[in-house]
Amino acid sequence: MRLDIRAHSLGLIPFLREHVKRQIAFAFSRYGSQIVSISVELDGADCQSGDESYRCRTRVNLGGENRFDVEVDDPDLEVAIRRSVERAARRVRMAIERVETPSPPAQDGPKDSYYNFLDHKVLK
């Protein structure tokens, strides 16, 4: 798994880099072999209200068409990082479970007793 961390309009101090790495390791540790790359972008978001806010965008590539982007704005940069990584991990988990869970076998038609009951009532 390749990890890319970038900070736009923010200084990427060692504390932020380690914080992002720790969050990624905790959230994606069980899916590491299935993830091709993760990219985290940190930025100071522009708000119309004048309040300072930060943005964290987490991009996860599972290979092929399975790519996810999650973006979170929050006044606290550490909270934005945690929420973005948690949401991305949840989407990865759902995508992996969807692939691993076999779909139910197709049926020829409605043979359920409920449908037969409705047909019987309509005919009378």
Image (spheres, rainbow, N blue to C red):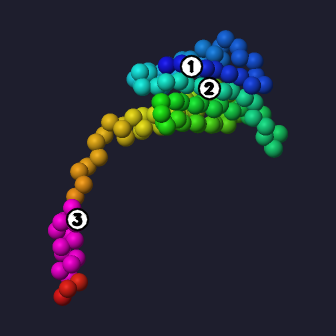
Whichever of labels 2 and 1 marks the residue nearer the N terminus, that label is: 1
- Nearest the viewer among 58 and 65 is 65
Callout 3, which amino acid? Answer: Gly
* 103 relative to 32 in the view: left or right: left
Residue at numbered disc 1:
3
Callout 2, which amino acid? Answer: Val
**Quarter of the figure that contains the C terminus:** bottom left
Asked whether disc 2 touches disc 1, contact meaning CB atoms under 8 Å apart, the reply is yes
Whichever of labels 3 and 2 marks the residue nearer the N terminus, that label is: 2
Per the model, the C-alpha gap separating discs 2 and 1 is: 8 Å
Q: Position of residue 91 (x, y in %)?
A: 48, 37
Residue at numbered disc 3:
109
Answer few, some or many: residues within 10 Å of disc 3's Cα (few below 14, many 20 plus, some between 14 and 19): few
Q: Secondary structure at mark 2?
A: strand
Foreground mark, 1 or 3?
Answer: 3
Callout 1, which amino acid? Answer: Leu
Per the model, the C-alpha gap separating discs 3 and 2 is: 48 Å
Residue at numbered disc 2:
40
Identify the residue at horizontal 56%, vertical 19% (top origin). Answer: 3
Q: Secondary structure at mark 3?
A: loop
Foreground mark, 3 or 2?
Answer: 3
- The boundaries of the magenta stretch are 108-121
Whichever of labels 1 and 3 marks the residue nearer the N terminus, that label is: 1
Asked whether disc 1 touches disc 3, contact meaning CB atoms under 8 Å apart, the reply is no
Identify the residue at horizontal 60%, vertical 25% (top origin). Answer: 39
Q: In the displayed structure, would residue 110 be above or below residue 43?
A: below
Per the model, the C-alpha gap separating discs 1 and 3 is: 48 Å
Q: Secondary structure at mark 1?
A: strand
Q: Quadrant of residue 73?
A: top right
Decide whether residue 118 is among the magenta residues. Answer: yes
* 96 relative to 7 in the view: left or right: left
Q: Residue furthest front?
A: 64
